[in-house]
């Protein structure tokens, strides 16, 4: 009697499909061990008591102050847009400033949003922020990040253009 090979082929096909799905999943997701730490040049130490200063990129300057009380830390300050943004793009569609708390090795423990604002003039002066957040256990430093989008005005027949900008601590 001939053997029916259909169940065997169905099983092989199922194994092949599951293997392909697992391979795709591992290729698209980044394993925990593949994440690298935020480099020291991007970190601002918390050990200095109440850190304050100016953190700047090509797009923004963040003047910040902090006050640490127990397990809470308050960040306040002002975000200003550099000429690279404000000279060309008069309207900011959205802007979000975040802070990431890091351990001694520079690994992210927690992140928090410090400021979110939409539809405003990039030339209207600085954006004030003030927020108190929980300081995660083991935090020894922090790093700022942001994302936003701005557009230029439409003058005459000129077509307005848009610029997206962002900064995440290098990883």
Image (tube, rainbow, N blue to C red):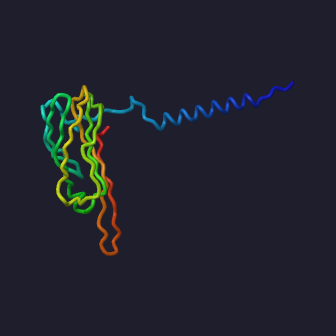
Q: Residue 105's image quarter? A: top left
Q: Is residue 6 above or below residue 62?
A: above
Q: Count how many numbered circles sit on residues in the image.
A: 0
- The one nearer the camera, 53 or 65, is 65
Q: Quadrant of the N terminus?
A: top right
Q: Residue furthest top?
A: 1
Q: Is residue 2 above or below residue 132?
A: above
Q: Position of residue 44 (x, y in %)?
A: 19, 36
Q: Position of residue 118 (x, y in %)?
A: 29, 55
Residue located 19% across and 50% down the image: 79
| Residue 29 in the figure: left or right of residue 109 | right
Q: Quadrant of the C terminus?
A: top left
Residue located 31% across and 57% down the image: 93
Residue located 74% across and 29% down the image: 7
Q: Position of residue 16 (x, y in %)?
A: 63, 32
Residue located 58% across and 35% down the image: 20
Q: Is residue 166 above or below residue 104?
A: below
Q: Position of residue 40 (x, y in %)?
A: 23, 34
- The one nearer the camera, 118 or 25, is 118
Q: Residue furthest right?
A: 1
Q: Residue 108's image quarter? A: top left
Q: Residue furthest bottom?
A: 156
């Amino acid at each position: 009697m001939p053997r029916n090979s259909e169940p065997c082929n169905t099983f092989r096909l199922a194994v092949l499909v599951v293997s392909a799905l697992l391979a795709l999943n591992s290729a698209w997701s980044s394993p925990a061990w593949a994440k690298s730490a935020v480099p020291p040049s991007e970190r601002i130490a918390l050990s200095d008591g109440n850190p304050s200063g100016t953190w700047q990129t090509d797009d923004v300057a963040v003047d910040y102050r902090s006050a640490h009380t127990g397990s809470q830390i308050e960040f306040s300050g002002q975000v200003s847009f550099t000429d690279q943004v404000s000279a060309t793009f008069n309207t900011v569609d959205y802007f979000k400033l975040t802070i990431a708390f890091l351990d001694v090795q520079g690994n992210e423990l927690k992140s928090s949003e410090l400021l979110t604002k939409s539809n405003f003039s990039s030339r209207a002066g600085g954006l004030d922020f003030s927020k108190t957040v929980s300081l995660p256990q083991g935090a020894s430093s922090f790093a700022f990040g942001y994302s936003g989008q701005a557009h230029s005005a439409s003058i005459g027949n000129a077509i307005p253009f848009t610029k997206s900008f962002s900064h995440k601590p290098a990883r």
